[in-house]
Amino acid sequence: MSANVPESLKRRIILFANLGHALDHYIMLIYPTTILALEKAFPEVSYGALLQLSLGAFVLIGLGSLPSGWLGDKWSRRGMMIIFFFGAGLACLATAATSSFVALAIGLAAIGLVASIYHPVGAPMMVASASPERLGRVIGLNGVFGNLAIASAPFITGAITDLFGWRLAFIVPGVAALAIGAAFVASVPDAAERSTRKSVHAEEYSRFTVFRVFGILFFCTFAAGLIFNVASVTFPKLFEERLPDLVHSATAAGAVTTAVTIVGALAQLTVGRAMDRFSLGTVFLVTSGLQMVGLFFLADAFGFAAPSAAMVAMLGQFGQVTVNEAMTAKYAPDRLRGRIYAVRYFLNFAVAAFAVTMAAKMHDATGGFTGTYRILAICGALIFLGALLFPRRDVAPSTRTSVQPAE
């Protein structure tokens, strides 16, 4: 990182990266809660059919990450973030103005395409702006912003939908995105590019270590993508079915989903601090274990056992995301960092198309989510296996003979 970049500018970059992370996840989770209102407005259309209208969004958030990462590396990360903020605002407002299911699907697809920009662009900007001794805490805080958005989106969306209709649930974050974009343009100058090109965190590890780390990371990313995408779009409906005495509206379904998700969101601060003290492999093992156990019990949980098991699963899920961010920061070469982030999120969201289709079809076929969440539990077990194979300590760079613990 350039020594000429002021600390105040680095802090602003991290702030907007955090806001961008929150916005990115929030706009992707508006529709799964508004479905509950659309079900009542169009009783002749099944939940599965309505859910599949978001298929294009989840396809494009994966496919779009690859060119987004390349453009961020080759052109301008600041420029891509400007497109992200203003594009998100316009896409949300356009979706709110739709008048048919076809137009709604196109609007949701536009949201997905714009949302594909953040992770391969905003995450490298944030990592390059963080000091080495605070990397874990910066990544953890960034995760909290994203996951608080995941947690709050169902509740806020449900409340707005019940009180004012589903269209306003898209308008409010659309206006917020435009405002954040304007503040970003004014606060982060072109000179910020200097602070996003060189990372002080990566070291020259042996080729075997790098292949081992990213082989495990990419495999686990694919499995975690299935878990994340199914859980994020089905939680409101899942709790409506598993808590029939408590959940009777979109607001109630969103509130329970928020309560469950916020546990994992806040835990990322603890996970971030743990990464500054213990090896990534050790923290990875603990978080993946929690995810596996939570999903195993969630498959058949009913009543208040369902949100309890979901909390454990989300604690592990979101903690694991924080670990994966640190893996990329420490092991990815500077010149490829944006594209490696892009491949990670391509794998994560490429499976989203299958995840949404699987959840929709299995729910319509079985009338519930038991089979779906048993599949997720198997994915959790595979991720835990990957964590067992990950180094408990960083392997020393090839130019040194000692073995040192990860930061």
Image (tube, rainbow, N blue to C red):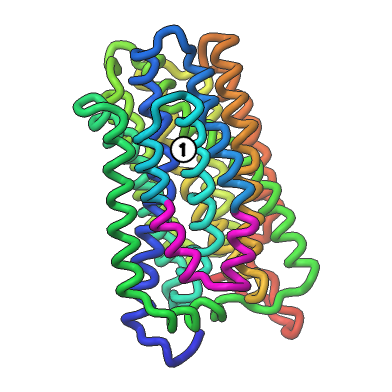
Q: In this view, which residue lies farthest toward the right?
A: 208
- Tell me: residue 268, above or below residue 302: below
Q: Quadrant of residue 126?
A: bottom left
Magenta stretch: includes residue 71: yes
- Residue 315 percent across, percent down from the top left: 44, 43
- Residue 392, percent across and down? 64, 60
Is 155 one of the magenta-colored residues? no
Residue 230 shows up from this direction? yes
Residue in the picture at 45% in, 39% down: 314
Q: Residue at x 62, y 34 (%)?
A: 353
Q: Quadrant of residue 393?
A: bottom right
Q: Amino acid at mark 1?
A: Gly
* Identity of the residue furthest to the left in this view: 163
| Left or right: 59 in relation to 43 | right
In the rendered view, would you say 361 is above or below 88? above
* Farthest-out residue, top: 44
Secondary structure mostly taken by the magenta-highlighted segment of the chain? helix
Q: Residue at x 35, y 35 (%)?
A: 96
Q: Is residue 18 left or right of residue 61?
A: left
Residue 251 drawn at (x, y percent): 26, 26
Write the residue at 49% across / 83% down: 194
* 238 relative to 361 in the view: left or right: left
Q: Which residue is mark 1?
A: 107
Q: Secondary structure at mark 1?
A: helix
Depth check: give the residue in front, 391 or 168: 168
How many marks can you see? 1
Binning the other alpha carbons within 10 Å of mark 1 as few (below 14), some (14 to 19) or many (20 upward) gives many
> Is 7 rendered above or below residue 172?
below
Report the span colored magenta: 65-87
| x and y, in percent, of residue 254 in the image | 32, 29
